Amino acid sequence: MKVLITGGTGFIGSHTVVSLQEQGFEVVIVDNLSNSDSAVLNRIAKITGKESYFYCEDICNRDALKNIFSEHQDIVAVIHFAAFKAVGESVEQPLKYYHNNITGLVSLLEEMKSARIPNIIFSSSATVYGQPENLPATEDSPVLPATSPYGNTKQINEQILRDFLLVNQDLKGISLRYFNPIGAHPGGLIGELPIGTPNNLMPFITQTAIGKHAELKVFGNDYNTPDGTAIRDYIHVVDLAEAHVVAMNALLNNSLKENYSVFNLGTGNGFSVLEVIQSFEKTTGVKLPYRIVERRPGDVEQIYASTKLANEVLGWKAKYSLDDMTLSAWNWEKRLSEQHFSYDDKV
Ligand code: UFG
């Protein structure tokens, strides 16, 4: 079985390629390397012992997509990761986000339709829920107005997919709403490669611990939570990757009732920022310098997933603990500091 992975050299994409290859899938990757490194391809091959087909192309380039589908007529499904994802940048450069994230999906669906590719999995986000009134967030929780162009593109893309599949009942799709993916492959060969100063908590923690930043700023300790810091549902990226394989099998085996489904991917457990720091310090033995500062505008107070639907319908459940996540993220950061990742094994 051959699948096309857009954004396959990115953080979640690369881990998913590994999981797919380990389960016997052949993988074609299309990625323009705008936020990743081609060295990831060799790293994936080192882990799985299998090569991927690779196209350094932009998914908004229709001719490139046509060419890929014509060279690989045996592709049975697409997993669509390729998108911009920085919330703050999306506020500053909205058109960049609307162009890439919306045009990308529309081009892909049009080309999939003409190439008769029947299955798609879309990378969505828990951001579509905003701050839910009731927790845990279920797939039926209201989708609230987005607070950033980035969040808006996730909502619009889900809607595009829903509308498209409504009138194309012979095609099937799944949106996977990720909570907070962190951690790295246990071997330390692939992980998150943030360009510039990271906005997200885990890479900022590991970079602070390795000495790249003087301290972590904890954004607010006056939330209505047990320790006052904000709560999220952190999920190990390897668990997330495996969920894509399970979802892919559900599509290929025709085991879902509807031709469009939505699933939350989280652990179901909420942890505060201070609990993440405590886990990091406990698993690594490294003391983390941090300081409480003002809340970050746009942050929700707390969110965690109901994972019931993914458990019952897909038979999937996250296996890794928060300690596994913080330790693997640290091992990855240490590996990165020991080598010049970008230059050591370019393809
Ligand atoms: N945080 C800090 N200090 C930091 C970075 C983050 O205290 O330096 C806190 C945040 O305030 C938040 C928590 O750590 O409470 C997690 O923050 P992240 O930036 O890691 O993750 P978010 O929950 O804000 O963002 C994630 C995804 C986005 C998505 C968003 C909305 O990364 O893509 O969820 O659900 F849009």
Image: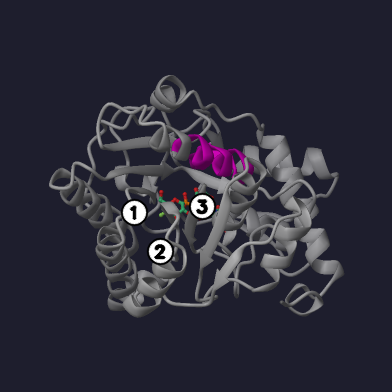
- Residue 151 appears left or right of 239: left
Q: Measured from the top left, where is residue 294 in percent x and y?
A: 48, 57
Q: Secondary structure at mark 3?
A: strand
Cα separation, mark 2 vs mark 1, equals 31 Å
Q: Measured from the top left, where is residue 71 in percent x and y?
A: 46, 69
- Give the label on residue 87, or none: 2
Q: Which region shows up in magenta?
A: 228-247
- Residue 141 appears left or right of 59: left
Name the residue tied to disc 3: 2
What amino acid does circle 1 point to? Ile
Is 252 part of what is drawn in magenta? no
Mark closer to the observer (2, 1): 1
Is 234 part of what is drawn in magenta? yes
Label 3 CB-ligand 1 distance < 8 A: no
Q: Residue at x 20, y 46 (%)?
A: 165
Looking at the rendered image, the quarter that the C terminus falls into is: bottom right
Callout 3 crowding tier (Cα within 10 Å): few <14, some 14–19, many ≥20: some
Name the residue tied to disc 1: 117
Whether residue 72 appears in this view of the structure is: yes
